[in-house]
């Protein structure tokens, strides 16, 4: 999971806030219940608030595109 933290830079994939170490939560983009795996490609960082809001829906249908620090202005 350290790879996910390094890739995402501790930024919530939904609200884009910086998430303190002790509040990082990992979210399955494709939920396990829908066949998603616990792999780096299927995990993203969410803050606690955003993770609580998320349902079992496919994240791609509801969420913003994955955060990419290189594409930010």
Image (spheres, rainbow, N blue to C red):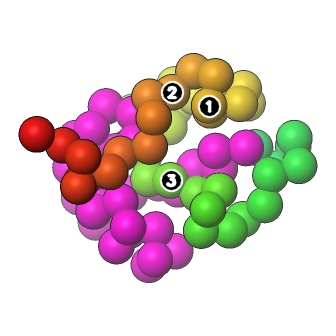
Residue, x 23% and y 55% (percent of image)?
70
Residue 70 in the magenta stretch? The answer is: no
Q: Are marks 3 and 1 in contact (CB under 8 Å)?
A: no
Question: Sequence-wise, which precedes: disc 3 or disc 1?
Answer: 3
For image coordinates 87% across by 43% down, the residue present is 33
In the figure, 73 relative to 62: above or below? below
Q: Are marks 2 and 1 in contact (CB under 8 Å)?
A: yes
Helix or strand or loop: what does disc 1 sit on? helix
Q: Which residue is mark 1?
A: 60
Any mark on residue 44, and which? 3
Describe the element under mark 2 as helix, strand or loop: loop
Asked whether 2 or 69 is in front, the reply is 69
Q: Dot 2 corresponds to which residue?
A: 63
Q: Residue furthest left?
A: 73
- Residue 40: numbered disc: none
- Label 3, secondary structure: give it: strand
Number of other residues with Cα within 10 Å of mark 3, as a class: few under 14, some 14 to 19, many 20 or more: many
State if disc 3 and disc 2 touch (CB < 8 Å). Answer: no
Eyeballing the image, is 47 above or below 36? above
In-image side of 1 versus 55 (left or right): left
Q: Earlier in the sequence, mark 2 or mark 3?
A: 3
**Residue found at the far top of this picture:** 62
Q: Is residue 31 visible?
A: yes
Residue at image position (52%, 74%) is 1
Q: Which is nearer the eye, 36 or 26? A: 36
Residue 3 vertical placement versus 67 (above, below): below
Cα distance between the residues tagged 2 and 1: 6 Å
Give the left or right position of residue 32, taking residue 55 as reference.
right
Give the magenta range: 1-30
Q: Farthest bottom residue?
A: 2
Percent position (x, y) of residue 49?
A: 39, 33
């Amino acid at each position: 999971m350290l790879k996910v933290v390094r890739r995402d830079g501790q930024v919530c994939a939904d609200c884009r806030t910086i998430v303190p170490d002790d509040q990082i939560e990992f979210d399955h983009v494709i939920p396990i219940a829908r066949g998603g795996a616990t792999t780096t490609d299927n995990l993203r960082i969410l803050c606690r608030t955003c993770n609580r809001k998320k349902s079992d829906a496919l994240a791609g249908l509801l969420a913003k595109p994955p955060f990419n620090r290189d594409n930010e202005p």
